[in-house]
Amino acid sequence: MKILKSFAVAFSMYSRIPMPKFDWASEDMKYHLIFFPFVGAVIGFVMYLWHRASFILPMNGIPFAAIGVIIPIIITGGFHVDGYMDTCDALSSWGDRKKRLEILKDSHIGAFSVINLITLGILLFTAIYLMDDKAILTWCFSFVEVRAVSGLCVVRSKKAKSDGILSTSARTAQDNIVVACLAVEFIISNFVAGLYFQWYCTCSLIALMIAVVYYIYVAYTKFGGITGDLAGWFVCKAEVYMAIAVAICSMINNPAIAG
């Protein structure tokens, strides 16, 4: 029962997929991060179905890429995009650490967050448009891998604040069990992707590593640790980094795509 409740908590927090409603207790939060990558699996599966549908429906790459951009947003309800925009506003403020953390709490959005979101969306749209079949299928696995790494960072990384959803998730998590499960989920996803799409998977993994290093650097130097908003910022950027990486692989393997 605890596992089922943790599953429901994870999908209720990180997606808009309907789940049974109940009063959460700290016990229900212990293992919920284990199921965070499962939300990514749903996104990846829907993206795969959309890819298959593109062979049947009369469309070119533009509508496919446009819907591909919004599929993660529809499933998550923009949960991570909200953190991305708040973080972009904080980073663009050029204030001190205290000021940046205050901006993260502000429910209003600024011009820089909108500019950054549009830029990120254009980059993602272009990357999806340039992907060949192998790149798209490789990218489907990225949603699992990004969330597994994000969960590991939540449990193991320094926190900027002692309150908030992220800190609560870290406090209530059973560290060793959650870390082990997230690591296994990441390894399985990466192994399966690498089994079929070796070159693409390698490039995708390198992009994820770059995103993680940059995430930890920004979190520690600009905010004093990670927060829930920064975690959302990381998920958005990592997914786009990995999309760009496999798109570059597509252009190298199929020069006609870039033309």
Image (cartoon, rainbow, N blue to C red):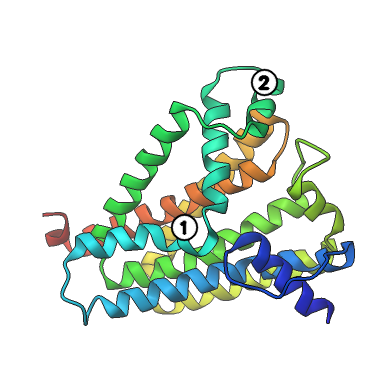
Residue 179, quarter of picture: bottom right
Question: Under tag 1, what secondary structure?
Answer: helix
Q: Residues within 10 Å of mark 2 (few under 14, many from 20)?
A: some
Q: Quadrant of residue 53?
A: bottom left
Residue at (77, 71) in percent of width and height: 6
Determine whether 117 is above or below 182 in the image.
above
**Is 63 rendered above or below residue 57?**
above
* Label disc, if present, on residue 256 of the rendered structure: none
- The residue depicted at 61 percent of the width and 35 percent of the height is 107
| Residue found 28% across the figure and 60% down from its top | 65
Q: Amino acid at mark 2?
A: Lys
Residue type of the residue flagged with mark 1:
Ile
**Residue 198 drawn at (x, y percent):** 40, 71
Of residue 121 and residue 223, the one placed in the foreground of this image is 121
Determine if residue 230 is in view: yes
Which residue position holds label 1?
Answer: 73
Residue sitting at the far top = 95
Residue at label 2? 99
Quadrant of residue 228 within the rendered picture: top right
Comparing labels 2 and 1, the label whose residue is closer to the camera: 1
Q: Earlier along the polypeptide chain: callout 2 or callout 1?
A: 1
x, y (%) of residue 41? 53, 73
**Label 2's element?**
helix
Name the residue rendered at 20%, 78% in the picture. 57
On the rendered image, what quadrant is the N terminus found in? Answer: bottom right
Q: Quadrant of the C terminus?
A: bottom left
Give left or right: position of 256 versus 127.
left
**Residue 165 shown left or right of residue 40 in the figure:** right
Residue 8 picture location, percent across and down: 71, 72
The spot of residue 183 in percent (x, y) is 68, 67
Q: Nearer the viewer, residue 250 or 80?
A: 80
Q: Is residue 197 visible?
A: no
